[in-house]
Image (cartoon, grey):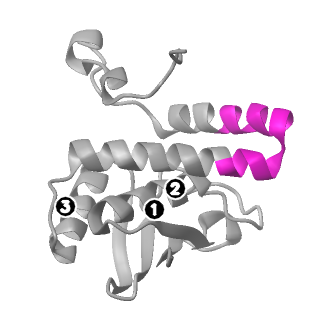
Amino acid sequence: MKRKYEFSWDLLGDIGEGRPNLGNTTRVEVYRLMQFTFRDIIEKHVGIQKTDEIFYEAGQLAGNAFYQNMITKTDELNNFVNQLKAVLKELGMGILRVEEADIEKGELILTVSEDLDCSGLPEEGYEICTYDEGFISALLENFSGKPFIVKEIDCWCTGDRTCRFSAKAVTQ
């Protein structure tokens, strides 16, 4: 059975044709309004843990599509990171920095400042960038060919002023 909303990059549409006056920009509040209302309703239906799993998986789906459509394939970590930094900044998604990287060991520490999901939110005492975790894991897997588990270890919502992620390759 064909799914009604199976994701494809084509679903992003032709922005120039569809929004000739407003273009491809909107406010962060609109993005967050959609994200956090989805999160609230999904959590009511399936609970916190399952909601986090759904957001992580959605982030992975987005990261896969993003890599395929926005990043030029390379085997050079610096080239990949520089491309990613540039496109994330250009699209207003955040400012990426790699604090530590040992690609041979499959371990990285990354930060995203001015993160689209949480920068400027009130302190909640817990990390909220589950979607970003999945997004980053898919980007790293597409680059390296190895699956990664990504966990946010610092967040604006825990009192930090940047989101920090620990990425570890999955060993079989």
Q: Of the numbered discs in the image, which one, if any, rests on residue 83?
A: 3
Coordinates of residue 145 in the picture (x, y in percent) = 32, 65
**Closer to viewer: mark 3 or mark 2:** 2
The type of residue carrying mark 3 is Gln
Q: Is residue 49 above or below residue 99?
A: above
Q: How many marks?
A: 3
Tell me which amino acid carries mark 1.
Ser
In the image, 124 versus 70, the foreground residue is 70
Query: In the drawing, does residue 86 fall left or right of residue 7?
Result: left
Q: Earlier in the sequence, mark 3 or mark 2?
A: 3
> Which is closer to the viewer, label 3 or label 1?
1
Where does residue 39 sit, x and y in percent of width and height?
A: 70, 39
In the picture of the structure, the residue carrying the numbered disc 1 is: 137
Q: Label 3, label 2: how many angstroms apart (C-alpha)? A: 19 Å
* Disc marking residue 134: 2
Report, in whole angstroms, how far the alpha carbon at label 2 lies from the one at label 1.
5 Å
Give the magenta part as a residue range. 36-53
Q: Image quadrant of residue 126? A: bottom right
Q: Quadrant of the N terminus?
A: top right
Gap between marks 3 and 1, in whole Å?
16 Å
- Badge 1 element: helix
Q: Is residue 86 magenta?
A: no
Number of residues whose C-alpha sits closer than 10 Å to that of mark 3, classed few (under 14), some (14–19) or many (20 or more):
some
Give SS at disc 2.
helix
Q: Contact, CB < 8 Å: mark 2 with mark 1?
A: yes
Q: Secondary structure at mark 3?
A: helix
Question: Which residue is painted at 31% across and 54% down in the image?
Answer: 88
Crowdedness near tag 2: few (<14), some (14–19) or many (≥20) residues, C-alpha within 10 Å: many
Task: Say what amino acid the circle numbered 2 marks.
Answer: Gly
